[in-house]
Image: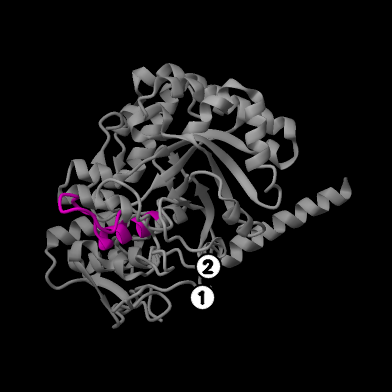
Amino acid sequence: MEAESRKLLLLCLCCFVFLATSGAQPHIGVNYGEVADNLPPPDATAKLLKSTAITKVRLYGVDAGLIRALAGTGVSLVLGVANGDIPAIAADPNAASGWLAANVLPFVPASSISVVAVGNEVLESGDAALAAALLPAMQDLRAAAVAAGGAAAGIGFSTVNTMAVLAQSDPPSAGAFRADAAAQLQQILGFLSRTGAPFMVNPYPYFAYQSDPRPDTLAFCLFQPNAGRVDAGSRIRYANMFDAQVDAVKSALGRAGYGAVDIVVAETGWPTKGDPAEAGATVDNARAYVSNLVAHLGSGAGTPLMPGRPVDTYLFALYDEDLKPGPASERAFGLYHTDLTMAYDAGLTSSGSGAATTPTTPTTPSKGSGSGWCVASAGATEAQLQTDMDYACSQVGVDCGAIQPGGACFEPNTVRAHAAYAMNQLYQAAGSHPWNCDFRQSATLTSTNPSYGSCVFTGGQ
């Protein structure tokens, strides 16, 4: 028993060292889609993942090569049961035991498997028979895992839903599940609650923007400066669409009587390109959304309804998938191209890791190569700067005390001077990447230290 305790302590210490020294993000994962004919070998993908801060990977099925390549790396896995396998597993516990024996037991405990997602978007599939088989399949797989014991017994069994499982998501406080799915969801939520498994959902601010392609909606979706949106029910002012969507799910869970069930964001992302009618599908917007989301999760702020509790979030996706059907955007969600170059820098590269580089070199300085300072641009209006200052000062990790009366940077008491200080504070707190100093083009980077007297602007190299 004492030896087992020492092993457990050593494992915990190893995990701590991994997180502390690798720049790992404990709440950030990525989806590994395979609808492509040009994916890199598993070992190359494993090497790429180890060069990043990503600590979790979701597979849509079971890829033995990648699972083995990630064994012993500290990367946690979500495996998937195909929708087509659900009826047989639901009908026969022996089929569940067989699935587990073929797809889980050969890999544990060498590989860390946290969750098995039983089906993908089943409740939104329109297939009533498949939806009816979902919970029995989850129950059979869970029973088989418990019977197998060891590492398998600690795996959670859940299923992945789209935001369409909600009847209402706006405002977030009114979040509620669809009436036609409520009965099945009540039983599924009861199962999740009893077994400690999470509710998995796919919020996509990109699709929210598609349905309302206005500039202020884009800023709200990209975590960029905006006036925010007040929830008329809770009176909470939301600063971004991601938090609003996740809190709508939180409200729906609470309304169903299962507010204590954890939420996992199984997919979210932004495409780098799309068809002419697909507004907002650009590299710049993808970089803004994902990098700002990564910074938001890394801050530990959580959401207004779950303060200090950032949700585990799986970015969609690791690679572009060239064989996916549908509009062009469906083939352009990758953080990386399949030649292992970055589609854009999302702020996920571990420092000093020798990770893959972007095809083009940024022309503006990035952190570690002369990050400089972020200040108000000459052409910005006072109205723009006031909005940007209010936004910056409302963000977690930004201290605007110096521009309050009596503060070291209160004088000169002008909107432009105060906004410059606030924008620089947010730029530095968010990671000092060039895109953190965008503010709808009302800010600019400078290599000249704007500090004066006792007013010190953080930054520089």
Q: Earlier in the sequence, mark 2 or mark 1?
A: 2
Q: Residue at x 28, y 59 (%)?
A: 272
Position of residue 131 measured from the top left corner of the image (x, y, whole percent): 44, 23
- Kindly identify which residue carries mark 1: 354
Q: Is residue 172 left or right of residue 97?
A: left
Q: Residue at x 22, y 45 (%)?
A: 209
Position of residue 212 measured from the top left corner of the image (x, y, whole percent): 18, 42
Q: Is residue 5 left or right of residue 296?
A: right
Which range is magenta?
271-293
Position of residue 245 measured from the top left corner of the image (x, y, whole percent): 34, 39
Q: Residue 231 has which mark?
A: none
Q: How many marks?
A: 2
In this orientation, does residue 191 appear? no
Would residue 255 be counted in the magenta stretch?
A: no
Q: Secondary structure at mark 2?
A: loop
Would residue 272 be counted in the magenta stretch?
A: yes
Instruction: Tell whether label 1 touches label 2 (CB within 8 Å).
Output: yes
The residues tagged by marks 2 and 1 sit, at their Cα atoms, a distance apart of 7 Å
Kind of residue at disc 1: Gly
Position of the C terminus, as image quadrant, is bottom left
Q: Secondary structure at mark 1?
A: loop
- Kindly identify which residue carries mark 2: 51
* Badge 1 density bin: few <14, some 14–19, many ≥20, Cα 10 Å: few
Q: Is residue 39 above or below residue 8?
A: below
* Badge 2 density bin: few <14, some 14–19, many ≥20, Cα 10 Å: many
Q: Is residue 40 above or below residue 258?
A: below
Position of the N terminus, as image quadrant, is top right
How are the colours assigned in the image? Answer: one colour
Kind of residue at disc 2: Ser
